[in-house]
Amino acid sequence: MLVTLAALTYVVHGVPLGQVKSAIAAASVPHFLLGCGAQLLLRAVNALRIRIIASAQGAPLSYRAILATMFTTAFYGLMLPGGVGAGAATFMKYLGHGATPAAALASMIVNRLLDVAATVTLGLAFWGLANYAPATGGAKDFAVLLLVVGPLMFLGTHLLLFGRLRVLRRIRTVSQRFGLEHRGLVARGIGRVIDQCATAGNLSTADAVSVGTLSLLKVVLAVATAYTFAAACGLQLSFATIGWMHAIVAVLVLLPISFAGLGVREGTLVLLSARYGVAAPLALAWSLLLFVGLLFVAAIGACIEAWNFLRRRGP
């Protein structure tokens, strides 16, 4: 809360709000609507990936239930810092659909690992792509290195999780040697979560490829969302540039230091965009449009929750 207020206070006092208001008012409606559409498609893709992993676990989570959870967690995510609110809501929703606590936690852990891996590694590749053309000498070589290393890091992480090494299964083997299932309640719970993580990592080759592809597609759609909102404000930033900016913002927003990323997202984008000559009011307008896009998704989640509540009450 304090970080959110401090960051917002710093940005608000340093940026002419009249210019921000004018930039938002002049924003392209078609681009904004396209960005909102990308938000919906992103969640549809994410739900499909989660469904594949849930199937490997034997968790009774349908695609429809997972997709609905994607929207409702956006709503609850506005109320608690970082990923705490969304995580708690996801956990409770999965339990409501019949998943065990261990299966629900394991699904969240594995999917978060995939999200972070895809976001960070593609962010590195996007930075290399964005800086390759203008760079010279050693800087160009470093950009090329990141272009190669980024995708290889993602592939390596994916193979560790779902390839022959099956790291999650090896972790389960180690935990079994410690006999967690024979210890206290907390130890047994940890053991069950580790067991479910190992089960989630036991994908067929086809499913592993699908999960990897969907993870990358999700990041690309997230960047496309940010790109269309930037275009709505008239920002002349390349897709690759927005790609590495998105990676930084996405990681910072995960930290439990702000509500729905407010303040952190705005301050980060204003600072990063300044490097490309983007005026602070335009950068702040862009960030606020991103937040409005999140509110659009959260509003759908609120409607789903209201419908479920009324349906439970009956006539």
Image (cartoon, rainbow, N blue to C red):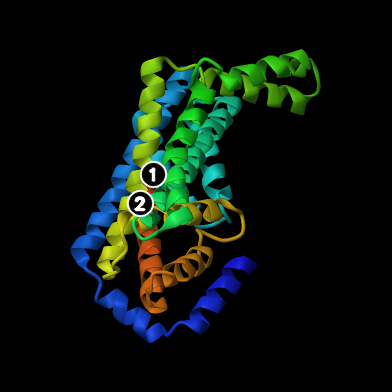
Q: Which residue is drawn at 35% across and 83% down?
A: 19
Tell me where residue 298 appears, x and y as whole percent.
Answer: 40, 54
**Disc 2 target residue:** 223
**Disc 1 target residue:** 219
Identify the image quadrant of the N terminus. Answer: bottom right
The total number of labels drawn is 2
Q: Residue 41 carries which label?
A: none
Secondary structure of residue under mark 1: helix
Secondary structure of residue under mark 2: helix
Question: Marks 1 and 2: in contact by CB < 8 Å?
Answer: yes
- Residue 186 image-quadrant placement: top right
Which is more toward the observer, 300 or 225?
225
Position of residue 101 in the picture relative to residue 93 (left or right): right
Q: Residue at x 47, y 49 (%)?
A: 142
Residue type, label 2 = Val
Instruction: Mark 1: give few (<14), some (14-19) or many (20+) Cα within 10 Å.
Output: many
Give the Cα separation between the discs numbered 2 and 1: 6 Å
Compared to residue 9, the image places residue 296 above or below, namely: above
Tell me where residue 164 appears, x and y as whole percent.
Answer: 52, 15
Compared to residue 37, the image places residue 281 above or below, namely: below
Tell me where residue 286 appears, x and y as whole percent.
Answer: 36, 68
Q: Which residue is drawn at 40% across and 59% down?
A: 135
Compared to residue 229, the image places residue 143 above or below, namely: above
Q: Which residue is drawn at 60% across and 73% down?
A: 6
Compared to residue 14, the image places residue 135 above or below, namely: above
Tell me where residue 146 appears, x and y as whole percent.
Answer: 46, 45
